[in-house]
Image (tube, rainbow, N blue to C red):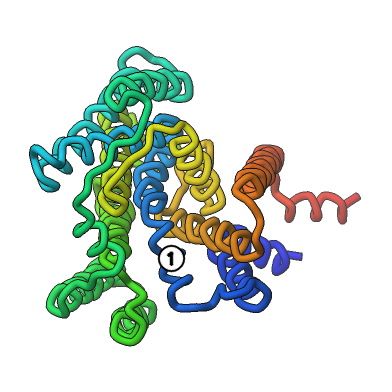
Amino acid sequence: MHKSKNIISIIDQNRAILLLILLTCFSAIFAPNFASRMNLSTILISGCMLAIISVGFTLVFILAQIDLSIGATAQFCGMLCVGLQPELGWTLSLIIAVLAGALIGLFNGIVVVKFKIHSFIATIGTMTIIRGILHLYSDGGTKSIDNYSLGEFLETGQFPIWFIIIVIGAIILFVVLSRPDVKTIKGITTIVVPAVFIILWLTTKLFSPIVIITFIIISIGIFLVDHTRFGKGFYVVGGNPETAWLAGINKDMYIILGFVICGITASLAGSIFAMRLSSMTARFIFAQKALMTSLAAVIIGGTQLTGGKGNILKSYFGVLMFQVLFNMIGCFGLGFEIQIFINGLILAVVVFYEAYTNYRHELLKGQRPELLKEAQSIR
């Protein structure tokens, strides 16, 4: 009985990567043209925006908060980046877009912390405001430019080998410094991760620049949240605010900072997406899909709605799982409406499962099965 519970727990904790593996295997066998190099590269590229969004979104969930404005923030900042590019160039327009995202996050954080408004309500209000500003700025249409050179590089270009070596060196350093107590995992990861990275880069060119940039942003997020003393505070604040207060952790600062980081990652995601396409639309479906898919991916990745638990890497696996699923639907010739339906269905199932798990946990809290057996034997 105990072993079966452990197996179920392991499956539950790693459900995102297990679902990703199962869907990938099923698609490779049954979906037409799924396993081609070009299609696999397309899956990685199409998941970049949601993957970057999920970094900050996971952090906000860990804090037991929610940011429903991330889709609108990504859309507005992407629009701003494209709109300013002809006068300012990509670099300065990107900086301004990211600053705008940070300000949106700061506004959300202050409203939640200082005015004591629930983040669900506060960020719905922010989303509505951003939608209005977006339509005023774009006249409800699409902003685009004629310069496609950066977009082509992000999709089909390739970083020089020295850059790849630096990235691999950073991965090795990250593994060595982050888990010095786990020698086996450290040794395997130090050898396997760079080797896989080099082989895929040299043989298939599967990792385009936009994918590598996404990996870097995810790695920075993982390092800051999971492997620094400061990052551990997010888990304490979200999981047990009273303990955080007793430990002298500034809860308000962490919540505001979490929203700021969420705004920055959303703005980065939207800006990079706009750079890749050299355009950005004002259609509401863009922000809605970004929000709903990110929300589903983060929850499937194991991040709890009640806070205190979450993992950025598993959220990324959740994003990839959805991209594989959507791509498989496309390979079978099914429409966009099927994608939306399945996305909502999976989200509903996972939310219900999380609610049931939390209910069982609260129900069994404090119970001692071994004492119950002893009492029954006495009787």
* Residue 179 picture location, percent across and down: 31, 69
Residue marked by disc 1: 42
| Residue at screen point 69% across, 41% down | 352
Kind of residue at disc 1: Thr
| Residue at screen point 41% across, 64% down | 44
Among all residues in the image, which is located at the extreme right?
Answer: 379
| Residue at screen point 63% across, 51% down | 335
Work out whether 201 lies above or below 217.
below
The quadrant in which residue 72 appears is: top left
Left or right, residue 256 beside residue 315: left
* Residue 223 picture location, percent across and down: 27, 58
Residue 165 visible, this angle? yes
Work out whether 154 lies above or below 52.
below
In terms of depth relative to the viewer, which is nearer, 136 or 272?
A: 136
The quadrant in which residue 226 appears is: bottom left
Among all residues in the image, which is located at the extreme front?
Answer: 146
In terms of depth relative to the viewer, which is nearer, 87 or 121?
A: 87
Quarter of the image that includes the N terminus: bottom right
Left or right, residue 227 beside residue 11: left
Residue 65 visible, this angle? no
- SS at circle 1: helix
Mark 1 Cα shell of 10 Å, populated few (<14), some (14-19), many (≥20): some
Work out whether 96 lies above or below 149.
above
Left or right, residue 260 beside residue 285: left
The quadrant in which residue 258 appears is: top left
In terms of depth relative to the viewer, which is nearer, 255 or 296?
A: 296
